[in-house]
Amino acid sequence: MHRVSINLLTVVPVFILVGCIFIIVPQPAFAIAAVQQNLSPCYHKELDSLGFLAGDWIVEANVKTGDDKWEQSSATSQIKPDLSGCLFVERFAGSRAGHSFSSLGIMGFNSVSGKLQRVWSDSEHGILILYEGHRNGKEMILYSEVVLNGNRVKLRHAYLDITRDSFRLESARSQDDGKTWITVSKLQYQRKGG
């Protein structure tokens, strides 16, 4: 059997040199971030602006009824990240006009249009509505356009006063191409235990 003698004074500088080469060679920033944070390929930094949504919420709802009166009720909402954090899914449960009311919302970021998106439907209407828009500080405004009874109607979902533990969601509609808006619901979200 042969003995191999290793001189540490020779080996250690080689390891240091190899380590320096790995540090000096630039890596793409997105590659480093993906490795460090174990991000999904569908991740975009704009999704971070939706992070405030995640959680369990108590919702105080004020909804305009058909006779232009306001109905107050309490509801709950659970919003969870899905598809490796590339979407946020909301399940809302409450009541309206004396019967149960629920809605489902899916939020994400469209990297092609550069806009935040929300697909929404509820147990009252059952249709899918796509809203698009942007977040700016403590506000996130999303718009949609639908045809109701032959009339083109603009819709707006405004997330207002966004904090870690609360936000307001106001829904409005316009029949004059956004010149005037009629608010149809005001929801105050408060984080459970927050």
Image (spheres, rainbow, N blue to C red):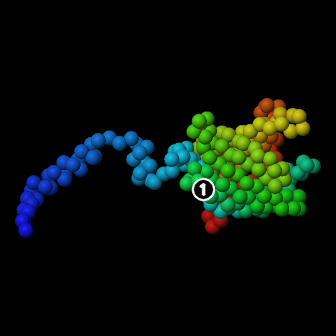
Percent position (x, y) of residue 92? 73, 58
Label 1 is placed on what type of residue? Pro
Q: Residue at x 55, y 54 (%)?
A: 84
Vertically, is 156 above or below 169? Answer: above
Instruction: Determine the image quadrant of residue 191.
Output: bottom right
Tell me, yes or no, if residue 16 can be seen here: yes
Percent position (x, y) of residue 188? 72, 55
Q: Nearer the viewer, residue 187 or 100?
A: 100
Q: Quadrant of the C terminus?
A: bottom right
Q: Residue at x 23, y 50 (%)?
A: 19
Q: Quadrant of the N terminus?
A: bottom left
**Residue carrying label 1:** 81
Q: Is residue 103 left or right of residue 107?
A: right
Percent position (x, y) of residue 150? 89, 34
Percent position (x, y) of residue 15? 19, 53
Residue lying at the far front of the rendered structure: 1
